[in-house]
Image: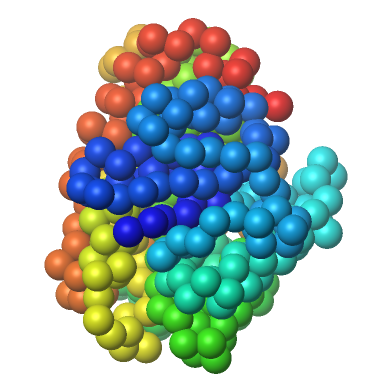
Amino acid sequence: MKILISGICGFVGSTIAMRLKETVSGVEVFGFDNFIRPGSEQNRLALKRLGIRVQHGDVRNAADISGLPAADWVIDAAANPSVLAGVDGQTSSRQLVEHNLYGTINLLEYCKAHRAGFILLSTSRVYAIKPLAELKVKTVGAAFRPDTKTRLPLGISARGVSEEFSTSAPISLYGSTKLASESMALEYGATFDFPVWINRCGVLAGARQFGRPDQGIFSFWINSWLRQRPLKYIGFGGKGFQVRDCLHPRDVVSVILKQIRAATQPPSTQIINLSGGAESAMSLAQLSQWCAERFGPRKVPGDDSARPFDIPWMVLDSALAKQTWNWQPETPREAVLDEIARHAEDHPDWLDISLP
């Protein structure tokens, strides 16, 4: 079996590639990357040591994709994953669309040409911002939780946000490019008769993740705490009570392999959530408490300024993945945090490497 991974030198793409190579007998993993992210060259060397072929290519360039050798499956891990992309004054909205949507279309054309299956790594950010921003929450132990005594929107429970939740705009430019990519993938698969699976992931985290506040908050926070870099609680009273879950990307591989081996694709299961769930969720304030116990205390100032697309609580409910694939995350939250911390301790220059 031959598997092509786009964005293979990013944190997620490289982690999945390594996991596949180490655990699946006879698999040939190869991929491409445009190496625009600081730190990606280090992942290239690690992949090369495992015998994984990597070449330079830009997912936005159709000629780069059409020239790749044939594969049985494509895993689309190439994206600009920042919810602020295209609106932060530092990145182009057009380039965001070209990267996330047009890039996916180029890969779908590749799948059509080679009769390859397609797996899209999507995001929790496809879910509607307005009802999430307006969600009634209560404070429990320095963290927000949905107030279950109020009437919650369809698709939200104490377990998290399910696939039934609204994907109506606004969902951010980033979220809309991923939602449009999902729709195009399903249409291509149905029209040209190749299998398509869409995995909406929560916050992916682990060692070697590039420490950026808009893309790798767990890595950024732990590395910044350890190195005494500036940190700040932004919005929601400036207390850091906003909550996210975390999932190690290597735990995605087990469900990807089941999807590859599946004989049929019931439409009701083509799109699933994958996350660490409520068990892995924590607030920034709780992450600070963890860092203080590990590295020593420090004070984090607060800023009550509101930012576009900020929401108080986002935890994905992966019940459908468990029901369909008997899947659940294998790496507990504490192990994810410890792995990041050990990597931070061993790499004192990681923030300088991974920040632009």
Q: Is residue 73 left or right of residue 184?
A: left
Q: Is residue 92 left or right of residue 214?
A: right
Residue 10 spot, x, y in % from top left = 53, 39
Nearest to the observer: residue 252 or residue 242: 252
Q: Quadrant of residue 215?
A: top right
Q: Is residue 178 left or right of residue 348?
A: right
Tell me: residue 164, above or below residue 27. below
Nearest to the observer: residue 159 or residue 199: 199
Residue 120 spot, x, y in % from top left = 48, 65
Residue closest to the far left? 326
Q: Quadrant of residue 157?
A: bottom left
Residue 202 spot, x, y in % from top left = 41, 55
Q: Residue at x 66, y 66 (%)?
A: 106
Q: Residue at x 55, y 91 (%)?
A: 191
Tell me: residue 50, above or below residue 6. above
Residue 334 in view of the camera: yes
Q: Residue at x 31, y 88 (%)?
A: 266
In which quadrant of the rendered image does the C terminus lie? top right
In which quadrant of the rendered image does the N terminus lie? bottom left
Residue 231 spot, x, y in % from top left = 57, 24
Nearest to the observer: residue 60 or residue 2: 2
